[in-house]
Amino acid sequence: MPAMSDFRAMPRLLSAGLAGAGLLLATQVSGWAQEVTLKAAVFVPPTTTYGIPFKRFVDRVNETGKGVLQIRIVGGPEAIPGNNQADAVKSGVLDIASIPPAYYKSNMVEGDAQILSDMTVAEQRASGAYAALNKIANDRMNAVYLTTYGMGVPFHLYLTKEAPVAKPEDLSGMRFRGQPNYNAIFKRYNISSANIAPPEVFTALERGVVQGYGYPLWGIDDFGWAKLTKVRIDPGFYNVVVNILMNKTSYDKLTPPQRKVIDDAVAWFEKDMIAYTDETTKKSLDAMEKGGIKTVDFGPEWKKIALELYWDDLKKLSPDSIGKLQPLLTKK
């Protein structure tokens, strides 16, 4: 039979036991509270050329952030149309989106200045350009610029026939599938532009509705266009820019360990993309050569004029901001 002293000790033992259980529960709750899952989307299907780098970033976060922070890709444009993803980040429907600045130009025209830069992302950070763009995104879009990929991947014009083209003037009167950022150079050389959704471009090329298209160096085989392409015009101009944006409210709510997962993944990603970009560019060039796509070189003036024309266009839309950004985005 237990001694009376044992009964006297029971309240203290029970109290200590409950306190221990409470501490354990608090620890578990704290542990659970530390892990957060962010919802993300990308402007193209995640398995296509410009979706894969974002998937690499997400995989890095999920690998290093187990128990702390995870990212779930809800889909590509089939989940939320690319043109709506920036607004979805702004409102908090999405925590993160991977989209080019052309997709949110109506909210932040200054974003498109980044495609005209001759700097790496690291150089843009060092010059203050990245911080300036991030501040505008904070104020107008409730978004944070986490990182960027595509820098160093130029845009080109491609032809479906081996026409006698030797200089820009020879493109006069032709019709190309284009995007708004081609408008200035198309107007300069009397090229007609057709805004055709990517899934419909193959048929337009096949039927001769357009004689060519404007597109970056990577990814012309994503939709089968390479099969119909005969000529690539060099040099390329502009840069591909895909920005990974995060809702600022969501970002500000991250705990220090959660933010560290994001920051470390960004640092890793920007280094990793240097080698990835080089490798993918080489594969793209090799594939075009193997596919019989010939090149026509318009010379350095072609690239220079394209850049000057688009800088001028952007300055008309936002003179003060673009005037301040241009020197920050241009090598001395």
Image (tube, rainbow, N blue to C red):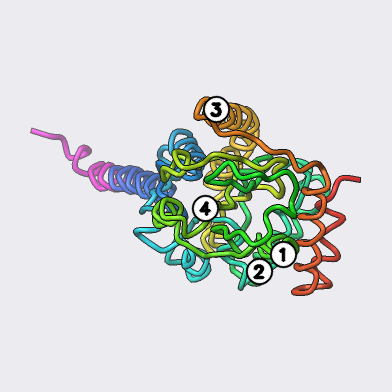
Q: Secondary structure at mark 2?
A: loop
Q: Earlier in the sequence, mark 1 or mark 4?
A: 4
Front residue (pair 158, 38): 158
Residue tagged 1: 184
Q: Which-is-in-front pick, marks 4 and 3?
A: 3
Q: At label 3, which amino acid type do we have? A: Lys
- Position of residue 265 measured from the top left corner of the image (x, y, whole percent): 56, 38
**10 Å neighbourhood of mark 4: few (<14), some, or many (≥20)?**
many
Q: At label 4, which amino acid type do we have? A: Ser
* Residue 39 visible in the displayed image: no
Quarter of the image holding residue 203?
bottom left
| Residue 108 tag number | 2
In this figure, what is the number of numbered marks? Answer: 4
Residues drawn in magenta: 1-15
Q: Is residue 100 magenta?
A: no
Q: Earlier in the sequence, mark 1 or mark 3?
A: 1
* Residue 288 visible in the displayed image: yes
- Position of residue 112 measured from the top left corner of the image (x, y, whole percent): 68, 60
Q: At label 1, which amino acid type do we have? A: Ala
Q: Are marks 1 and 3 in contact (CB under 8 Å)?
A: no
Q: CA distance from mark 1 to mark 4?
A: 26 Å
Q: Which-is-in-front pick, marks 2 and 3?
A: 3
Q: At label 2, which amino acid type do we have? A: Met
Residue displayed at 62% across by 47% down: 148
* Position of 174 relative to 24 (above/below): below
Residue tagged 4: 98
Q: Which-is-in-front pick, marks 1 and 2?
A: 1
Q: Secondary structure at mark 1?
A: helix
Main secondary-structure element of the magenta-colored stretch: helix
Q: Earlier in the sequence, mark 4 or mark 2?
A: 4
